[in-house]
Structure formats: C-alpha cells, structure tokens
Image (cartoon, grey):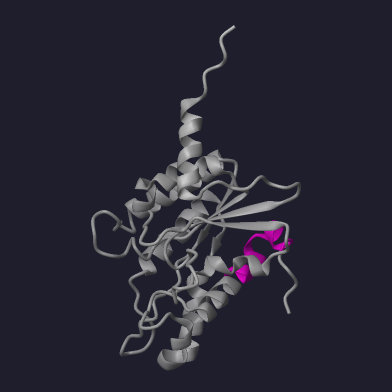
Amino acid sequence: MNAPRPNRSRLLFLLLATVFGLMLPASHAGEVVIQLIGDSTVKRYNDANPKRGWGQFLSLSFAPDVRIVNQAVLGKSSKSYQSDERWQLLREAGADYWFIQFGHNDSNRGEHRKTDPSGEFPRNLRTFIAAAREAGAKPVLVTPPPRRRFLPEGGLTRELEPYIAAMKQVGTEESVPVLDLNARASALFLELGEEGSVELMAPDDRSHFSEKGARVMAGFVAQEIRTHIPVLAAHLTPQP
C-alpha cells in the first residue's frame, strides 16, 4: 500500500507560519485567544524602539486564561493588510476573537493603502468580519485612536471621523461590537491639552504612543470590553 501523500497546502502553511511568526501555541483547556489585527498604533515593538502599541499591554487587564496574539503590522490599512501573506495565514491560525482596528492608513495618501470611507473601507471591514466568522472567531471592531493634532480653533483634526462613522455603521449592520477607543482617547487629549498630552506619545510623534500612552489606550480598550462584551469582560481582572 502506498504511503499517503503529504498535503502540500498544509506544508506551505506551516512553512510560511514559521517564517512570519504566526503559529499560535496549542490552546489549553478554557483558554481564550484574542487576535489583534491592525496597524502601527496596535503592534508590538522591540525594546530599542521608543514607540509602543496598545496591543502590547492589553494582556495586563486580563486574567491568565486569556492570551493576546498581536498580528498588527506597521503601515497597513484595511486594504493593504489583505495583500500581505499574513492575511492568508490568519484564517488558519485560530482564535476566539478577532479585534480589528484600521483607519489611520486608510485615510493616508497612497493608492496601495488609501480607501474610501463610504465604499471600500466598509467593504473591507465586512471581509474581515466574514473571515473571522468563517474561522470560528467572534469579530470585534475597534475605532482608531486620534492623532494628537489640535486645531487652532480648538478640538482635534477630523480626518478619521468618516472612517469611525463607517465602522460604527458596519458594526450595527453586522451585529458586531464596536469598541470606541477614539472617543475615550479624544476626550483625554482634549482634557490634557497640547502640552499635557505630549507624554502620551513617542518622541516627536503625533500618531504613535509612548509606553505610558499605550498603557492608557489598552486600559480604555478594556473599559470598552466591560461595556460591550460581557462574556469576555468576565475574564478581565477587577478594576482597582
């Protein structure tokens, strides 16, 4: 009897997963896995980089039975993330939740990543939602945190507002929780003002966080989970 031939697609997946660091360790009984999908405001940075993403610190709000897998990538939008090899692997990696945050790079120039907030952006969000559900995961949308750019007349710049509105509409239509990180972070920036909010950001940067800022943003995400995802909130550590 001939030996069974190896599944070439599976072998390719294992090879690419090893290269891109996408393999999730085997789940333990009762463990909850949250996969973070987004841009540089979410991603994990090494110690030599002064920037920090809020995804680096989200685990601090959870009990040990929750594992955070940070798949956020520098410079990606809802469009360009889907052209990355990582996107093809996410659907086989396995997770209980997909937290999806885009908007920063969707609002930037560049045909390879810019999207229309009234057309392509919401369509892309629906693609992520469908992929999460096909993979057996619960999708969750997270609104992008604001850039620390103050207007002369007061308030913050509004370039992200159409993307946030589109995300909320998609969330309503698809019955997906929307964690409004933008609203909480914007309120804090306005409360602290131009000078008072400097310490929340990486040096000479108005989009990326310092460690202090990233920890604050992760705390805001945890607060939103308490409000909008009661089942997952049961795994959060008690508030001080």
| Above/below status of 66 relative to 91 | below
**Residue 96 image point, x, y percent:** 63, 49
- Outermost residue, top direction? 1
**Residue closest to the eye, 203 or 153:** 203
**Residue 121 image point, x, y percent:** 36, 54
- Residue 28 is left or right of residue 136, and the answer is right
Report the quarter where the N terminus lies: top right
- Residue 106 is left or right of residue 188, and the answer is left
Q: Is residue 130 visible?
A: no
Report the quarter where the C terminus lies: bottom right
**Residue closest to the eye, 156 or 35:** 35
**Residue closest to the eye, 173 or 127:** 127
Q: Is residue 59 visible?
A: yes
In magenta stretch: residue 209: no
| Above/below status of 156 relative to 130 | below
Q: How many marks?
A: 0
Secondary structure that dominates the magenta span = helix
Q: Which residues are magenta?
A: 221-235
In magenta stretch: residue 222: yes
Residue depicted at x 34% and y 52%: 80
- Residue 212 is left or right of residue 198, and the answer is right
Residue depicted at x 47% and y 67%: 45
Residue depicted at x 45% and y 71%: 145
**Residue 146 image point, x, y percent:** 42, 74
**Residue closest to the eye, 166 or 190:** 190
Residue depicted at x 42% and y 93%: 195
**Residue 23 image point, x, y percent:** 55, 46
